[in-house]
Image: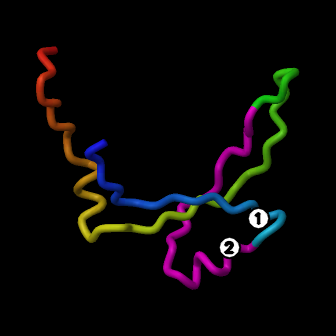
Amino acid sequence: YGYRPVLAETFVDPSRFRGTCYVAANWTRLGRTAGRGKPDRLGARRGTAKEVLVYPLTASWRAQLLAPLAPEEGNDA
């Protein structure tokens, strides 16, 4: 699709795991999710808060994520 990932993201459920392997592999903890979860068939949300960890795939990941989007070729909008 012409995209190149610059940052990997994962979620760890701290009620079940500590995420030790991610921390040992130099992943960065960003914080916790709100824990809203996906609604079940009745509309109730029973999610648990997860730890969010990221790992940069390129040295310039921050600049690439903050850069303005380039217009797509062939798009006359």
Q: Secondary structure at mark 1?
A: loop
- Horizontal and vertical percent for residue 64? 24, 54
43 relative to 64 in the view: left or right: right
For label 1, the residue is 14
Image quarter for residue 1?
top left
Left or right of 4 on screen, residue 17: right
Front in this rendered view, residue 74 or 30: 74
Residue 2 to residue 6: above or below: above
Q: Secondary structure at mark 2?
A: loop
Q: Which residues are magenta?
A: 18-38
Mark 1: amino acid:
Pro
Residue that protrudes farthest toward the bottom in the picture: 24
Q: Are the residues at dot 1 and dot 2 in contact (C-beta closer than 8 Å)? A: yes
Circle number at residue 58: none
Q: Residue at x 65, y 49 (%)?
A: 33
Name of the residue lying farthest toward the right: 42
- Give yes or no for residue 60 being in the magenta stretch: no
Q: Residue furthest front?
A: 1
Residue 5, given in percent of the width and then of the height, sits at 35, 56
Residue located 40% across and 60% down the image: 7
| Residue 25: % across, % down | 53, 82
Q: Residues within 10 Å of mark 2 (few under 14, many from 20)?
A: some
Dot 2 amino acid type: Gly
The residue indicated by pointer 2 is 19
| In the image, residue 77 above or below residue 60 | above
Report whether 68 appears left or right of 13: left
